[in-house]
Amino acid sequence: MVRVSREDFSVAAATNASAYRRVTIPMLRVEAGPGPAVALIAGVHGDEWEGQAAILDLWRRLPDILQRGTVYLLPAVNAQASLAGTRLSPADGGNLNRAFLGAPARGYTESVAAALEARLLPRVEAMVDVHSGGASLRYLPSSVITRYGDDAYDERLPALARAFGLPHCVFFRGNEAGSMPAAASRHGVLRLSAEIGGGGETSRSLADRCRDGLLGCLGALGLLPDRPLPRNREIRLYDLDAPAATLRAREPGVFVPGVELGQPVAAGEDIGSLIEPARPDTPIRTLLSPQAGTVVCLRAIARSDDGDCLLQVAPALPLDSLASKY
């Protein structure tokens, strides 16, 4: 018998206009007897819509198909940022993916992180946390494997990435103590992420691919009926670990990319330019690829400033080589 319950929680989010305001974070618990407990999370950044749409879809579908275990669904874990359509929390400008800093919680964003670490992470064995490029970036739809600190290699991660069903997987290391991967690591939670879409928009196709990926992960973890294997069994691992993978603007300008997501490029290849139409005497600045690889991320906003990420280029490796990367 499947049991469904709302386990919403609220945190303080005071503003100058509302001293005692609280924001409710929606959470649905779907339980179908003994089995693993898994969290499906989106909306860590409020302007990343694909995962939010996918988990909202599962909010309605999952009670009819879950066969065992427990699933926690959080379609907009930073509800305030989702309602505002912003990456950061409007109450305090906080980045939820850098707010897992422990007690005392200072402001709305850290209070959300503290609640997740106290109420959710100790109860689950695995988590899938979906992101996108938000308003400023677009990503090649990819599952994401992150290593935090000195975590040991977890041989379950490549299988979970394959179960997500996308032909691309990105790997990088995280060292921020306040990140969600760091919090998952502290609690021994198996974690897969994803980067799907961006540009401040979404589509039914991307949301459906995300939903199907989440279902694939639940199937691989044994919570759903036997599911056919994803078509894309052989996927490529893109190594974003190298500092050269990210090309940043060194001065203001309008970014005119000359490449597309998924395009292979050579080191030093012309990948676009920075122009300044309001100052036509300013020379066009040609941009060169920082290394050989595949374009996995592109800036979605043309007007750029010094330090903005313009694109990411990563070399591809077989997914089975991930063990050696650890």
Image: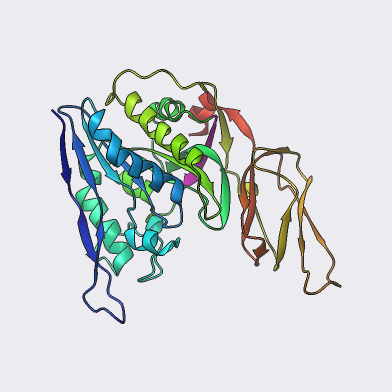
How far from the left and from the top, in percent, is residue 132?
Answer: 49, 48
Magenta part of the protein: which range? 167-174
Residue at (53, 57) in percent of width and height: 135
Left or right placement of residue 170 versus residue 77 in this view: right
Instruction: Pick the residue in front: 176 or 97.
Output: 97
How far from the left and from the top, in percent, is residue 235?
Answer: 55, 26
Instruction: Pick the residue in front: 246 or 84.
Output: 84
Q: Is residue 22 magenta?
A: no
Say which quadrant the N terminus sits in: top left
Residue at (23, 56) in percent of width and height: 115
How far from the left and from the top, in percent, is residue 290?
Answer: 71, 48
Q: Is residue 171 magenta?
A: yes
Residue at (53, 45) in percent of width and height: 197
Farthest bottom residue? 16
How far from the left and from the top, in percent, is residue 311?
Answer: 64, 51
Q: Main secondary structure of the magenta part?
A: strand
Q: Is residue 307 above or below residue 172?
A: below
Q: Is residue 33 above or below residue 78?
A: above
Residue at (50, 54) in percent of width and height: 134
Left or right placement of residue 311 versus residue 162 in this view: right
- Is residue 277 visible in the rendered structure shown here? yes
